[in-house]
Image: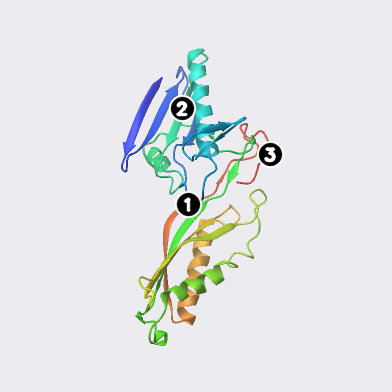
Amino acid sequence: MEVHLDPYGDHRANLIAEIGHCQTDRVLAFSGHMDTVGQGDKPWHHEPLGAEIVGDRLYGRGAADMKSGLAAIVVALIELKEEDRLPSGALRLLATAGEELGTTGSHRLERAGLVEDVDALVVGEPTADHVVFTHSGSYSYQITSKGQACHSSHPADGINAVMGLVHFINEETRLFNDVAADSVLGTLEHSVTVINGGRQVNVIPDLATLEGNVRPAAVFDNHQVDARLKTLVDRINENTPFQLSLEVLFSLQPVVTKEEHPLVLIGPRRR
């Protein structure tokens, strides 16, 4: 089997494998990511990297998202190769790194032209055995709040940057309430997920930051999310003593495959 390793920074690498007679130029690709989200601090009932099997279930970090899907793709390609059941075109595996934060591996393969000739792409994410033909986007951002430091014994002499974030969070919770639900994906999901501020307990902080994530759909895309967040930041800056700024960390657009596509076989499940 033709296999290529694509290493890039921070001990990461993509892997590309391909089988087929290549008698036609048709390419069906399968993609899966090799990374997982962090283990977190929550106590685990099973060793998170132990791949323990209990009954008919395997417990371990990434068992569902998405080592099972990736393993299924790999096994299928190996069996097709061993049984000499190769297509006239090509089957291509794109095993990617860095999917969970910014999809760095996928972007790298796209820039290298490895999907330009692909006729269709199946992603092995867990979907309860249903074909999912639409996927929300991902818009991640950082808000920086600047204030003025002073001693906590005289807080009126300063501007507490943390309170600037409080203003933002209170508004963010209802910022998208009027957005119409997508017919497949449902309501637009949004969350503030990271907060940092203050360096010393008796000093009013002059700098604080938060990070958030929004999952846009086609009915309200990344550009509309961006515009609404900018409007909120401007409004807080105009009407409060706090000065906020918005930085977009990454912005991935929603993806939709037409329902009549031959690969779309069963109704969708929300993602």
Q: In this view, does 181 lie above or below 177?
A: above
Q: Is residue 191 above or below residue 104?
A: below
Give the label on residue 267, or none: 3
> Secondary structure under badge 2?
strand
Give the tally of numbered discs.
Answer: 3
In this view, the mark in front (1 or 2): 1
Callout 3–callout 2 Cβ contact below 8 Å: no
What x and y, as percent, mark residue 43? Answer: 51, 48
What residue is pinned by disc 1? Answer: 41
- Is 81 left, or right, of 262 in this rendering? left
Asked whether the viewer can see residue 3, the reply is: yes
Real-space Cα separation, disc 3 to disc 1, in angstroms: 37 Å
Real-space Cα separation, disc 3 to disc 2, in angstroms: 26 Å
Q: Nearer the viewer, residue 36 or 107?
A: 36
> Secondary structure under badge 3?
loop
Q: Earlier in the sequence, mark 3 or mark 2?
A: 2
